[in-house]
Image: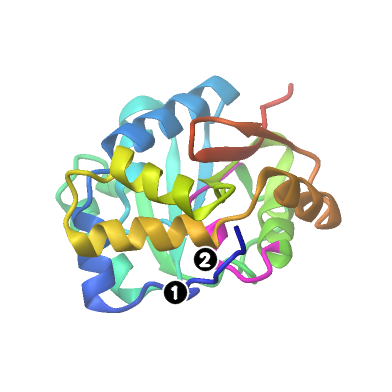
Amino acid sequence: MKRILEPEVMDTAEEADGYDSMDHSEPNANFLARLVELGARGRILDIGTGPGHIPLLVCARIAGSRIVGVDLSKNMLRHAERHRLASPFAERIEFRLADAKGLDFEDGEFDCVYSNTILHHIPDPKPFLAEAWRVLRKGGVLLIRDLFRPGDEKRADELVRLHAAGADAYQQGLFRASLGAAFEPDELRRIARDAGVDAEVVIDTDRHMSLQCRSKP
């Protein structure tokens, strides 16, 4: 199936509201479990934090963690800040408007860098991956999870029926478009290698893959 690009930034109020209202509980719980398994701790960067759901889960599960969430969408960050202020973890989380392809952080500033489902929004993700790797301390945890592109249109439609049956038509359309914009696992392996990222690509579910490396002493 040919890759069809999505807009790089979901910055309309409709897009942000629709995404925030979707049920991400299962994939987010699985994402958190992988972070814990890899040894995430300390100062953590969430690239493409969207409406800020995952930082709340990380703070609740990983004692002492401190999260900086960045996104290029002001409307997504509006939701993220609302969730932060309503949580018991407000002092451990901050959100910033930033471009994943050019981060204003020092080399090795974070013990863990993660990103959930923004890879498919970026036409050429090499600068994003290189930046994520640059700001990660040596031996830290990297987890970049995204959808992977199905082999054909029939399979993409089947995944929408399987995983978005309870969503409305607009939300189903968002999911379908994201599948079509995603990379294939071998594409991600090649892009990561070209970006200088020393991490493995693993298949997580029938629709998700991860570029990851675990904490080292």
Check residue 116 for magenta coloring: yes
How many C-alpha atoms fall within 10 Å of the one at disc 2: few (<14), some, or many (≥20)? some
User: Taking 216 as reference, is 175 left or right?
Assistant: left
Counting residues from the N terminus, which is met first, the one under dot 1 or under dot 2? 1
**In the visual, does 168 lie left or right of 34?**
left
Residue at mark 1? 9
| Residue at the image position 45 percent from the left and 53 percent from the top | 68
Q: Which mark is residue 121?
A: 2
Instruction: Tell me residue 29's x, y (percent).
Output: 35, 30
Instruction: Please report the residue visible at 41 percent of the width from the left and 27 percent of the height from the top.
Output: 62
The range drawn in magenta is 112-125
Q: Is residue 124 left or right of residue 21?
A: right
The circle drawn on residue 188 is none
**Percent position (x, y) of residue 163?**
31, 40
Which quarter of the figure is the C terminus placed in? Answer: top right
Question: Is 30 located above or below residue 8 in the figure?
Answer: above
Gap in angstroms between the C-alphas marked 1 and 2: 7 Å
Image-quadrant location for residue 101: bottom right
Mark 1 packing: few (<14 Cα in 10 Å), some, or many (20+)?
some
Q: Is residue 43 visible?
A: yes
Q: Nearest the camera: 106 or 152?
A: 152
- Front position in the image: 196 or 91: 196
Across and down, in percent, residue 173 comes to: 31, 63
Image check: 65 left or right of 104?
Answer: left
Q: Nearer the viewer, residue 26 or 167?
A: 167
What residue type is disc 2 on? His
